[in-house]
Image (cartoon, helix red, strand yellow):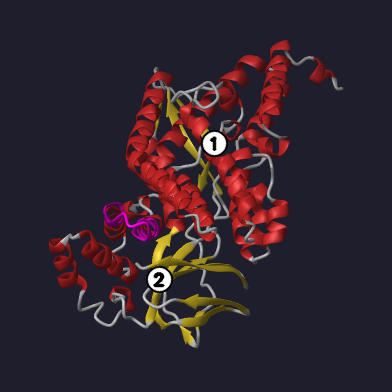
Amino acid sequence: MSWKCKTLPRKLGIALLTTAVVGCSSLSVNRLFSHYSAGNAPARAALATGDYSSALSMTGLEEPLLSELEKGRIELLSQQTEQSQAQFDLAYRHVAELEEQAVISISGSATSLGALALNDNITEYLPPDYEIGYLHLYSALNYVQKQDLEGALIEMRRASRVQERALANREASLKRAEDELKQSGVDPNLGSVMSRYPDAGDSLKAIQNSYLFYLSALLFEADGDFNAAYIDISRALAVNDGNPEIIGAAIRIGTKFGAREEVDALQTQYGERLANSAAIERLGSDSQQGRVIIINEVGVVQPMKEWRITIPVYDSRNNTAFYSLALPYYDQGTLVKGLPVVLDDTELTTKNLTDVNLMARQSLTEQMPTILVRQTLRAITKDRIRKEAANGDDAGNALFNVFNTLTEQPDTRSWQSLPATVHSATAMLTEGEHQVKVGEQTLMFNVRAGQTTLVWLSQQGNNASMWSTNLGRL
């Protein structure tokens, strides 16, 4: 040990030891000096090529809740239904426990000692609304695959409650950020940051998930609950009125529900466009055909990346200091095109149901004011700790500057095994055996006259997970 290190003030040693203890008790060294997207890159790369087995084996355990979500999703793709649902059940209980905690807790608040001394990765991860929605959606699909309609409907009702409270959660989160900023006694120029932030923009429709609403409507329709089915298909239509399957289902369910005026309006608005579409064909008792609804997931959602920026911060005396922040962001990326979906001998034209990348970007953009406040408070706190502990010592200052820079990591945690986009198609087929082909993979399924068959597929790279089930007389 050099003589300079020996002369470090006692306060510095205590501060470093305290920080190390906090860090070691809450997160690994990798999370302390890195971020989730970097650590999860190998697993995500394997999934993007369709290597489900390798992706599952490389999914880390450093974030318990995210590990449950990632594993549940990859096991769903591997058609390990029981294992997948066990992971989703754990995740649901984990989320419920977090939501029962106080709105601002010692571990979750921006004023938490650990979060202020290190980075946001030390806090508990509570998934944003759109991810919780997908937790229930995929749980429902597991139940559908097992032909457990009751279990699937329970998940759909849970998902509906998530959507209903989403707006209130956003407003409460923004208010907390504003209150913490006022209490800090500083004024970071958040407007200048938001104007340059890569994700800034208006994407309001990305808040709602038409995939979830559409599937929910189909399941409630299968259960004979036309009221709930009509509510959800109306929500899906409000989000995405360019999808013929949603339009056709709205007309079909609205007719069953007895919403005559609404159905007449829908037929007037969309009837000409859908005149030759199988989506609005009704199956009579004497029909020799069956309806086939195809859900086609494509690719893997984008991960968040790191964006560093320097901002001015003003204290109560109007003194100015400049701090470097490490923020998460999504780049625009490239559109992932899936393999053609061939039904019997015909290549299907699928329509967009949901853009998960858009939902992820929108969710992060909404969180940015809160993230900026936490980042700014942390930068100020780290600087104050450095000044007090080092007390003018050059070696102490240098050590703290290095430590602060290394531990300033963006919070890039997100559910990264979700698909990039989701599409749908509908076809009318004669009763009997049919096939759907994606790349070199083929799924054989039976169509029953007058009934509806759901074909679900999710493709990554040259691989695809596929299964089918009968939904009855929809």
Residue 130 at x, y = what percent? 44, 48
Q: Nearer the viewer, residue 57 or 308?
A: 57
Residue 128 at x, y = what percent? 46, 42
Mark 2, other Cα within 10 Å: few <14 / some 14–19 / many ≥20:
many
Q: Is residue 36 above or below residue 406?
A: below
Mark 1, other Cα within 10 Å: few <14 / some 14–19 / many ≥20:
few
In the figure, residue 354 lies in which quadrant? bottom left
For the view shown, which residue lies furthest in the front direction?
Answer: 286
Query: Residue drawn at (43%, 60%), measured in percent from left and top?
Result: 355
Inspect this view and state whether residue 325 appears.
no
Q: Nearer the viewer, residue 78 or 104?
A: 78
Classified by dominant secondary structure, the portion drawn in magenta counts as helix
Q: Quadrant of the image for the C terminus?
A: bottom left
Name the N-terminal-most of marks 1 and 2.
Answer: 1
Residue 270 at x, y = what percent? 21, 72
Left or right of residue 362, residue 265 in this image? left
Q: Secondary structure at mark 2?
A: strand
Q: Is residue 206 above or below residue 345?
A: above
Give the residue number, with chain letter if any, for mark 2: 452
